[in-house]
Amino acid sequence: MNNIGEFMNWIKTFFIAIFLVGCGQADRGKAYVTSQDGGVSVIDLNTYEVIDQLDIGGLPRGLGLTDDGKFLVAANKDHASLTEVNLETKEVAQNIDVGINPEFVRIKGDLAFVSTEPSSEGKPPAKGEMKHEEEHDDDDDKTPAKVAVVDLNTGKKVRDITAGPETEGIEFSADGTKIIITNEADNTVTVHDFESGELLKTVKAEAYGERPRGIKVSPDGNYYISTLEFSDNFIVLDQDFNHVKTVNTTHDVSEDNPHKGKSPYGVSFNTSGDKLFVATTGGRGNRSALEIYDTKTFEKVNRIETDGRRCWHFSFTPDDQDLLLACGRSDEVLVIDSNSYEIKKRIAVSGIPWGIVTYPKSTGSLDQKN
Protein backbone atom coordinates (compact mmCIF):
# COMPACT_ATOMS: atom_id res chain seq x y z
CA MET A 1 0.00 0.00 0.00
CA ASN A 2 1.29 3.45 -0.85
CA ASN A 3 -0.08 5.21 2.21
CA ILE A 4 -2.29 4.94 5.26
CA GLY A 5 -5.36 6.17 3.35
CA GLU A 6 -5.09 3.43 0.75
CA PHE A 7 -4.61 0.83 3.48
CA MET A 8 -7.70 2.02 5.36
CA ASN A 9 -9.76 1.96 2.15
CA TRP A 10 -8.59 -1.60 1.50
CA ILE A 11 -9.50 -2.67 5.03
CA LYS A 12 -12.93 -1.02 4.71
CA THR A 13 -13.66 -2.70 1.38
CA PHE A 14 -12.44 -6.07 2.69
CA PHE A 15 -14.74 -6.06 5.72
CA ILE A 16 -17.71 -4.85 3.68
CA ALA A 17 -17.17 -7.74 1.27
CA ILE A 18 -16.97 -10.20 4.21
CA PHE A 19 -20.16 -8.71 5.66
CA LEU A 20 -22.00 -9.06 2.35
CA VAL A 21 -20.93 -12.67 1.95
CA GLY A 22 -21.97 -13.38 5.53
CA CYS A 23 -25.38 -11.88 4.87
CA GLY A 24 -25.78 -13.86 1.67
CA GLN A 25 -25.63 -10.73 -0.48
CA ALA A 26 -23.72 -10.72 -3.74
CA ASP A 27 -21.00 -8.17 -4.43
CA ARG A 28 -22.65 -5.44 -6.55
CA GLY A 29 -19.41 -4.66 -8.37
CA LYS A 30 -17.65 -1.42 -9.24
CA ALA A 31 -18.15 1.64 -11.41
CA TYR A 32 -15.38 3.38 -13.34
CA VAL A 33 -15.60 7.09 -14.10
CA THR A 34 -13.29 9.05 -16.42
CA SER A 35 -12.46 12.64 -15.55
CA GLN A 36 -10.97 15.05 -18.03
CA ASP A 37 -8.10 16.03 -15.72
CA GLY A 38 -6.51 12.67 -16.38
CA GLY A 39 -7.91 10.20 -13.89
CA VAL A 40 -10.33 7.31 -13.50
CA SER A 41 -12.28 7.12 -10.25
CA VAL A 42 -13.31 3.69 -8.98
CA ILE A 43 -16.60 3.54 -7.05
CA ASP A 44 -17.55 0.57 -4.87
CA LEU A 45 -21.20 -0.15 -5.69
CA ASN A 46 -21.74 -1.78 -2.28
CA THR A 47 -20.97 1.43 -0.40
CA TYR A 48 -21.12 4.12 -3.13
CA GLU A 49 -17.74 5.39 -2.01
CA VAL A 50 -14.75 6.26 -4.21
CA ILE A 51 -12.19 3.61 -3.28
CA ASP A 52 -9.43 4.24 -5.80
CA GLN A 53 -8.02 6.67 -8.35
CA LEU A 54 -6.23 5.48 -11.49
CA ASP A 55 -3.88 8.05 -12.99
CA ILE A 56 -3.77 7.43 -16.74
CA GLY A 57 -2.73 10.91 -17.87
CA GLY A 58 -4.09 12.93 -20.77
CA LEU A 59 -7.74 13.87 -21.18
CA PRO A 60 -9.73 10.62 -20.85
CA ARG A 61 -13.37 10.60 -21.89
CA GLY A 62 -14.83 7.46 -23.46
CA LEU A 63 -14.07 4.18 -21.74
CA GLY A 64 -14.90 0.50 -21.79
CA LEU A 65 -14.08 -2.75 -20.03
CA THR A 66 -13.06 -6.09 -21.46
CA ASP A 67 -15.63 -8.85 -21.06
CA ASP A 68 -13.60 -10.50 -18.30
CA GLY A 69 -13.28 -7.20 -16.41
CA LYS A 70 -9.49 -7.44 -16.27
CA PHE A 71 -8.67 -4.42 -18.42
CA LEU A 72 -10.07 -0.92 -18.75
CA VAL A 73 -9.50 1.06 -21.95
CA ALA A 74 -10.01 4.80 -22.25
CA ALA A 75 -9.80 7.34 -25.07
CA ASN A 76 -6.87 9.60 -24.23
CA LYS A 77 -7.18 12.90 -26.11
CA ASP A 78 -3.87 14.40 -25.05
CA HIS A 79 -1.89 11.42 -26.31
CA ALA A 80 -4.07 10.55 -29.36
CA SER A 81 -4.20 7.04 -27.99
CA LEU A 82 -6.25 4.32 -26.43
CA THR A 83 -4.91 3.75 -22.92
CA GLU A 84 -5.20 0.21 -21.57
CA VAL A 85 -5.07 -0.29 -17.81
CA ASN A 86 -4.49 -3.58 -16.01
CA LEU A 87 -7.07 -3.42 -13.20
CA GLU A 88 -5.24 -6.00 -11.10
CA THR A 89 -1.94 -4.11 -11.02
CA LYS A 90 -3.60 -0.68 -11.56
CA GLU A 91 -0.86 0.17 -14.04
CA VAL A 92 -1.06 1.39 -17.62
CA ALA A 93 -0.34 -1.67 -19.74
CA GLN A 94 0.04 0.20 -23.02
CA ASN A 95 -0.93 3.25 -25.05
CA ILE A 96 -2.11 2.43 -28.56
CA ASP A 97 -2.02 5.16 -31.22
CA VAL A 98 -5.48 5.61 -32.72
CA GLY A 99 -5.61 9.12 -34.20
CA ILE A 100 -6.28 12.74 -33.30
CA ASN A 101 -8.74 13.50 -30.48
CA PRO A 102 -10.16 10.08 -29.61
CA GLU A 103 -13.42 10.39 -27.68
CA PHE A 104 -16.00 7.58 -27.72
CA VAL A 105 -15.14 3.94 -26.98
CA ARG A 106 -17.11 0.74 -27.49
CA ILE A 107 -15.81 -2.78 -26.98
CA LYS A 108 -17.15 -5.84 -28.73
CA GLY A 109 -15.36 -9.09 -28.03
CA ASP A 110 -11.63 -8.59 -28.51
CA LEU A 111 -12.05 -5.39 -30.51
CA ALA A 112 -12.20 -1.79 -29.32
CA PHE A 113 -13.83 0.86 -31.53
CA VAL A 114 -12.64 4.40 -30.88
CA SER A 115 -14.07 7.53 -32.53
CA THR A 116 -11.63 10.31 -33.43
CA GLU A 117 -12.24 13.98 -34.22
CA PRO A 118 -9.50 15.48 -36.43
CA SER A 119 -11.64 18.59 -37.02
CA SER A 120 -11.85 19.43 -33.30
CA GLU A 121 -9.14 20.92 -31.12
CA GLY A 122 -10.28 18.47 -28.48
CA LYS A 123 -9.48 20.64 -25.45
CA PRO A 124 -12.12 21.43 -22.83
CA PRO A 125 -12.35 25.00 -21.52
CA ALA A 126 -10.64 25.94 -18.29
CA LYS A 127 -12.47 24.91 -15.14
CA GLY A 128 -15.36 27.27 -14.49
CA GLU A 129 -15.47 28.51 -18.08
CA MET A 130 -18.66 27.69 -19.97
CA LYS A 131 -19.18 27.85 -23.68
CA HIS A 132 -22.36 26.96 -25.52
CA GLU A 133 -20.67 23.80 -26.70
CA GLU A 134 -17.41 22.75 -25.10
CA GLU A 135 -16.59 19.92 -27.39
CA HIS A 136 -16.73 21.80 -30.70
CA ASP A 137 -14.01 24.34 -31.10
CA ASP A 138 -13.82 24.30 -34.89
CA ASP A 139 -17.15 23.65 -36.50
CA ASP A 140 -16.06 24.81 -39.97
CA ASP A 141 -13.57 22.00 -40.52
CA LYS A 142 -15.31 19.12 -42.28
CA THR A 143 -12.35 16.71 -42.25
CA PRO A 144 -13.75 13.14 -42.28
CA ALA A 145 -13.24 11.38 -38.98
CA LYS A 146 -12.08 7.83 -38.43
CA VAL A 147 -13.21 5.11 -36.09
CA ALA A 148 -10.08 3.19 -35.14
CA VAL A 149 -10.53 -0.56 -34.69
CA VAL A 150 -8.04 -1.98 -32.17
CA ASP A 151 -7.30 -5.65 -31.55
CA LEU A 152 -6.96 -5.83 -27.77
CA ASN A 153 -5.09 -9.15 -27.95
CA THR A 154 -2.25 -7.73 -30.03
CA GLY A 155 -2.52 -4.12 -28.89
CA LYS A 156 -2.52 -2.86 -32.46
CA LYS A 157 -4.86 -0.83 -34.62
CA VAL A 158 -6.04 -3.19 -37.35
CA ARG A 159 -8.09 -0.82 -39.51
CA ASP A 160 -9.94 2.49 -39.70
CA ILE A 161 -13.57 3.13 -40.59
CA THR A 162 -14.09 6.42 -42.41
CA ALA A 163 -17.10 8.23 -40.96
CA GLY A 164 -18.33 11.82 -41.08
CA PRO A 165 -16.65 14.88 -39.55
CA GLU A 166 -16.63 15.02 -35.75
CA THR A 167 -17.64 11.44 -35.15
CA GLU A 168 -19.36 10.98 -31.81
CA GLY A 169 -21.43 7.93 -30.80
CA ILE A 170 -20.92 4.27 -31.73
CA GLU A 171 -23.44 1.43 -31.62
CA PHE A 172 -23.74 -2.11 -33.00
CA SER A 173 -26.73 -3.73 -34.63
CA ALA A 174 -28.39 -6.49 -32.62
CA ASP A 175 -27.16 -9.17 -35.05
CA GLY A 176 -23.60 -7.85 -34.89
CA THR A 177 -23.28 -7.28 -38.64
CA LYS A 178 -23.30 -3.47 -38.62
CA ILE A 179 -21.73 -0.57 -36.77
CA ILE A 180 -23.70 2.68 -36.51
CA ILE A 181 -21.93 6.01 -36.04
CA THR A 182 -23.22 9.52 -35.31
CA ASN A 183 -21.39 12.41 -36.98
CA GLU A 184 -21.98 15.86 -35.51
CA ALA A 185 -20.50 18.30 -38.01
CA ASP A 186 -22.39 17.10 -41.10
CA ASN A 187 -25.56 15.98 -39.26
CA THR A 188 -25.45 12.36 -40.37
CA VAL A 189 -25.81 8.89 -38.97
CA THR A 190 -23.73 6.42 -40.98
CA VAL A 191 -24.16 2.66 -41.11
CA HIS A 192 -21.15 0.45 -41.87
CA ASP A 193 -20.38 -3.22 -42.36
CA PHE A 194 -18.95 -4.54 -39.08
CA GLU A 195 -16.16 -6.59 -40.67
CA SER A 196 -15.00 -4.32 -43.49
CA GLY A 197 -16.15 -0.89 -42.37
CA GLU A 198 -17.76 -0.33 -45.78
CA LEU A 199 -20.38 2.44 -45.79
CA LEU A 200 -23.82 0.87 -46.25
CA LYS A 201 -26.14 3.80 -45.65
CA THR A 202 -26.11 7.49 -44.71
CA VAL A 203 -29.04 8.93 -42.75
CA LYS A 204 -29.22 12.70 -43.22
CA ALA A 205 -30.48 13.99 -39.90
CA GLU A 206 -30.57 17.69 -40.81
CA ALA A 207 -34.22 17.39 -41.82
CA TYR A 208 -35.00 16.51 -38.19
CA GLY A 209 -32.36 18.44 -36.24
CA GLU A 210 -28.71 19.20 -35.62
CA ARG A 211 -25.77 17.52 -33.96
CA PRO A 212 -26.37 13.76 -33.65
CA ARG A 213 -24.72 12.63 -30.42
CA GLY A 214 -25.99 9.53 -28.62
CA ILE A 215 -26.99 6.37 -30.50
CA LYS A 216 -28.61 3.27 -29.01
CA VAL A 217 -30.27 0.13 -30.36
CA SER A 218 -33.43 -1.13 -28.65
CA PRO A 219 -33.06 -4.37 -26.65
CA ASP A 220 -35.18 -6.22 -29.23
CA GLY A 221 -33.03 -4.87 -32.08
CA ASN A 222 -36.00 -3.42 -33.95
CA TYR A 223 -35.12 0.27 -33.85
CA TYR A 224 -32.51 2.89 -32.94
CA ILE A 225 -32.53 6.18 -31.05
CA SER A 226 -30.21 9.07 -31.89
CA THR A 227 -30.17 12.27 -29.85
CA LEU A 228 -29.85 15.58 -31.75
CA GLU A 229 -28.26 17.90 -29.23
CA PHE A 230 -28.63 21.30 -30.85
CA SER A 231 -32.30 20.74 -31.74
CA ASP A 232 -33.56 19.48 -28.39
CA ASN A 233 -34.96 16.26 -29.79
CA PHE A 234 -34.22 12.66 -30.68
CA ILE A 235 -35.14 10.57 -33.69
CA VAL A 236 -36.39 7.01 -33.97
CA LEU A 237 -35.00 4.90 -36.84
CA ASP A 238 -36.38 1.49 -37.76
CA GLN A 239 -34.18 -1.59 -38.19
CA ASP A 240 -33.47 -0.54 -41.77
CA PHE A 241 -32.48 2.96 -40.56
CA ASN A 242 -35.51 4.73 -41.95
CA HIS A 243 -36.86 7.70 -40.02
CA VAL A 244 -39.97 6.83 -38.02
CA LYS A 245 -40.47 9.63 -35.51
CA THR A 246 -38.98 12.81 -34.07
CA VAL A 247 -39.52 13.47 -30.36
CA ASN A 248 -39.01 16.89 -28.78
CA THR A 249 -37.28 16.68 -25.40
CA THR A 250 -38.32 20.11 -24.09
CA HIS A 251 -41.94 19.04 -23.73
CA ASP A 252 -42.64 18.83 -20.02
CA VAL A 253 -45.10 16.50 -18.34
CA SER A 254 -45.53 18.85 -15.40
CA GLU A 255 -44.79 22.47 -16.34
CA ASP A 256 -44.03 24.81 -19.20
CA ASN A 257 -40.32 25.53 -18.86
CA PRO A 258 -38.32 25.99 -22.08
CA HIS A 259 -35.00 25.28 -20.38
CA LYS A 260 -35.94 21.78 -19.25
CA GLY A 261 -35.04 18.94 -21.59
CA LYS A 262 -32.57 20.99 -23.62
CA SER A 263 -29.43 19.59 -25.27
CA PRO A 264 -30.04 15.81 -25.12
CA TYR A 265 -26.87 13.75 -25.16
CA GLY A 266 -26.40 10.30 -23.55
CA VAL A 267 -29.19 7.81 -24.20
CA SER A 268 -30.04 4.27 -23.12
CA PHE A 269 -32.94 1.90 -22.69
CA ASN A 270 -33.45 0.08 -19.44
CA THR A 271 -32.75 -3.65 -19.54
CA SER A 272 -36.37 -4.63 -20.16
CA GLY A 273 -36.70 -2.06 -22.95
CA ASP A 274 -39.97 -0.52 -21.81
CA LYS A 275 -38.35 2.79 -20.85
CA LEU A 276 -35.92 5.11 -22.62
CA PHE A 277 -33.63 7.38 -20.59
CA VAL A 278 -32.16 10.56 -22.09
CA ALA A 279 -29.60 12.77 -20.34
CA THR A 280 -30.35 16.41 -21.16
CA THR A 281 -27.48 18.72 -20.32
CA GLY A 282 -29.65 21.81 -19.96
CA GLY A 283 -27.97 24.20 -22.38
CA ARG A 284 -26.04 27.29 -21.36
CA GLY A 285 -26.04 27.80 -17.59
CA ASN A 286 -29.01 25.51 -16.93
CA ARG A 287 -29.28 22.38 -14.85
CA SER A 288 -29.34 18.90 -16.30
CA ALA A 289 -32.16 16.39 -16.09
CA LEU A 290 -32.68 12.73 -16.90
CA GLU A 291 -35.78 12.37 -19.06
CA ILE A 292 -37.79 9.13 -19.12
CA TYR A 293 -39.97 7.97 -22.03
CA ASP A 294 -42.43 5.14 -22.60
CA THR A 295 -41.03 3.18 -25.55
CA LYS A 296 -44.47 2.19 -26.84
CA THR A 297 -45.61 5.77 -27.35
CA PHE A 298 -42.38 7.78 -26.88
CA GLU A 299 -44.27 10.07 -24.56
CA LYS A 300 -42.30 11.56 -21.69
CA VAL A 301 -43.51 9.93 -18.50
CA ASN A 302 -41.10 11.34 -15.94
CA ARG A 303 -38.11 13.57 -15.35
CA ILE A 304 -35.40 13.39 -12.74
CA GLU A 305 -34.32 16.89 -11.75
CA THR A 306 -30.64 16.56 -10.93
CA ASP A 307 -29.52 20.06 -9.93
CA GLY A 308 -26.31 18.94 -11.65
CA ARG A 309 -24.53 20.60 -14.56
CA ARG A 310 -23.48 19.02 -17.85
CA CYS A 311 -24.55 15.47 -17.03
CA TRP A 312 -23.33 13.63 -20.13
CA HIS A 313 -23.39 9.87 -19.54
CA PHE A 314 -24.99 7.34 -17.22
CA SER A 315 -25.22 3.66 -16.43
CA PHE A 316 -27.51 1.32 -14.56
CA THR A 317 -25.92 -0.76 -11.81
CA PRO A 318 -25.42 -4.44 -12.74
CA ASP A 319 -28.46 -5.40 -10.63
CA ASP A 320 -30.57 -2.66 -12.32
CA GLN A 321 -31.56 -1.23 -8.94
CA ASP A 322 -29.91 2.17 -9.38
CA LEU A 323 -28.75 4.62 -12.03
CA LEU A 324 -25.37 6.36 -11.94
CA LEU A 325 -25.23 9.75 -13.69
CA ALA A 326 -21.90 11.53 -14.29
CA CYS A 327 -22.25 15.33 -14.05
CA GLY A 328 -19.12 16.98 -15.39
CA ARG A 329 -19.62 20.60 -14.46
CA SER A 330 -20.73 19.89 -10.91
CA ASP A 331 -17.96 17.31 -10.27
CA GLU A 332 -20.24 14.55 -9.03
CA VAL A 333 -21.85 11.22 -9.80
CA LEU A 334 -25.50 10.94 -8.79
CA VAL A 335 -26.96 7.69 -7.49
CA ILE A 336 -30.62 7.48 -8.53
CA ASP A 337 -33.09 4.79 -7.51
CA SER A 338 -34.25 3.22 -10.79
CA ASN A 339 -37.73 2.50 -9.41
CA SER A 340 -38.64 5.61 -7.42
CA TYR A 341 -36.34 7.94 -9.44
CA GLU A 342 -35.20 9.59 -6.20
CA ILE A 343 -31.62 10.77 -5.83
CA LYS A 344 -30.10 8.60 -3.11
CA LYS A 345 -26.61 10.03 -2.97
CA ARG A 346 -24.19 12.51 -4.57
CA ILE A 347 -20.66 11.16 -4.90
CA ALA A 348 -17.95 13.81 -5.25
CA VAL A 349 -15.77 13.07 -8.29
CA SER A 350 -13.44 15.91 -9.22
CA GLY A 351 -11.92 16.82 -12.57
CA ILE A 352 -14.99 17.07 -14.85
CA PRO A 353 -16.35 13.49 -14.84
CA TRP A 354 -17.39 12.47 -18.35
CA GLY A 355 -18.03 8.75 -18.84
CA ILE A 356 -19.14 5.89 -16.61
CA VAL A 357 -19.31 2.10 -16.97
CA THR A 358 -19.57 -0.77 -14.49
CA TYR A 359 -18.32 -4.27 -13.94
CA PRO A 360 -20.12 -6.61 -14.09
CA LYS A 361 -21.21 -4.88 -17.28
CA SER A 362 -24.55 -3.14 -17.23
CA THR A 363 -26.83 -1.20 -19.54
CA GLY A 364 -25.98 2.46 -20.05
CA SER A 365 -25.17 5.18 -22.53
CA LEU A 366 -21.61 3.84 -23.04
CA ASP A 367 -22.03 0.11 -22.63
CA GLN A 368 -24.37 -2.86 -22.69
CA LYS A 369 -24.87 -5.98 -20.60
CA ASN A 370 -22.95 -9.03 -21.81
Image (cartoon, rainbow, N blue to C red):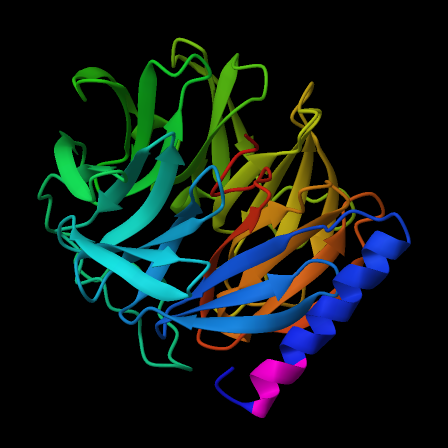
Q: Does the magenta stretch include residue 332?
A: no
| Residue 184 appears in the picture as rendered | no
How far across and how far down the image is residue 119, in percent? 13, 52
202 sits left or right of 21 in the view: left
| Residue displayed at 41% across by 18% down | 173
How far across and how far down the image is residue 225, in percent? 49, 28
Of residues 330 and 212, the one nearer the viewer is 330
How far across and how far down the image is residue 4, in percent? 59, 91
67 sits left or right of 247 in the view: left
| Residue 75 appears in the picture as rendered | yes
* In the image, farthest residue toward the bottom: 4
| Region of the chain picked out in magenta, as a range | 4-8
120 sits left or right of 71 in the view: left
Name the quarter where the C terminus is drawn. top right
How far across and how far down the image is residue 178, in percent? 32, 17
Instruction: In the rendered view, tell whether residue 142 sits above or below residue 48.
Output: above
* In the image, farthest residue toward the top: 240
| Residue displayed at 47% across by 43% down | 366
Instruction: In the rendered view, tell whether residue 239 sits above or below residue 57.
Output: above
| Residue displayed at 69% across by 58% down | 45
| Residue displayed at 36% across by 75% down | 37
Instruction: In the rendered view, tell whether residue 127 sits above or below residue 48.
Output: below
* In the image, farthest residue toward the right: 23
